[in-house]
Image (tube, rainbow, N blue to C red):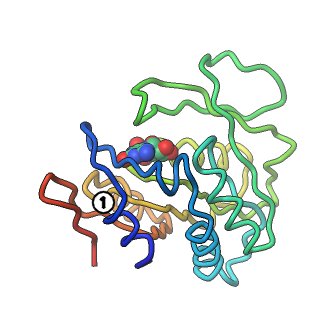
Amino acid sequence: MKLMEQKILREGQILPGDILKVGSFLNQNIDTDLLGEMGREIARLYDGAGVTKILTIEASGIAIAAAAGLSMGVPVLFAKKHRTSNVDGDVYVTKVHSFTHNEDYAVVVSRDYLLPSDRVLLVDDFLANGNALRGLIDLCNQADAELVGVAIAIEKCFSGAGDQMRAEGVRIDSLAQIESMTENGIVFRS
Ligand code: 5GP
């Protein structure tokens, strides 16, 4: 998505640890024109795919998932993060290693909201090492829900996780794909 690439080039900041800061338009201050475009683009990509639910993970996936859900006319479910792995109740739980905080946390959804009849589109802001996605896929598997695909705002292709998961048969669509990110600049996959 050209608009996203232009925004990254204009406003993205590369931080130590291969982190791209996009707080000016996505992760803190949200550019709602861009968000609307993202939602419409995800809806276009998954038109006719029979998605019944979008699943994301709090917090930064929620806005993108909501924009896509509005455009697609489907509900949005977000998995919650907990610091401890002792989570009680009628829930599905999985463990995810956080890229940005370098710690493990439990990720939880209520069994009431993720159903075997669901055809699920996963949405998140970034795909780096794939841990968040693998956690969400695990939740879908626990619920016997069907995974239709994955829509990501920004994929950091240099980590290799997205291509690895594609090779495993997961459909992944990324609105911007960063091939390399160095002090010399950002190069997108063409
Ligand atoms: P993964 O689990 O794929 O390693 O990382 C994905 C998660 O880590 C995303 O949900 C996102 O919140 C966070 N993340 C990974 N890389 C970046 C980055 O470069 N910038 C920001 N802002 N978040 C990132």
Q: Residue at x 35, y 66 (%)?
A: 177
Residue 93 lies in what quarter of the image?
Answer: top right
The foreground one among 143 and 183 is 183
10 Å crowding of disc 1: few (<14), some (14-19), many (20+): many
Q: Position of residue 69 (x, y in %)?
A: 73, 66
Q: Position of residue 23 (x, y in %)?
A: 47, 48
Q: Position of residue 185 (x, y in %)?
A: 18, 60
The foreground one among 169 and 108 is 108
The foreground one among 140 and 26 is 26
Could you tell me how many numbered marks the image carries?
1
In this picture, residue 187 sits left or right of residue 155: left
Residue 101 lies in what quarter of the image?
Answer: top left
Give the amino acid type for the residue marked by disc 1 in the picture: Cys
Answer whether residue 129 is visible to the viewer in this image. Answer: no
In this picture, residue 133 sits left or right of residue 8: right
Vertical comparison of 13 with 70: above or below: above
Q: Residue at x 61, y 16 (%)?
A: 84
Answer whether residue 80 is visible to the viewer in this image. Answer: yes
Quarter of the rendering occupied by the C terminus: bottom left
Vertical comparison of 184 with 131: above or below: below
The outermost residue toward the right is: 112
Q: Which residue is mark 1?
A: 157
- Helix, strand or loop under label 1: helix
The foreground one among 180 and 86 is 180
The outermost residue toward the left is: 184
Quarter of the rendering occupied by the N terminus: bottom left
Q: Residue at x 74, y 38 (%)?
A: 109
Q: Residue at x 61, y 33 (%)?
A: 94
Vertical comparison of 39 with 161: above or below: below
Q: Position of residue 80 (x, y in %)?
A: 68, 35
* Image quadrant, ligand 1: top left
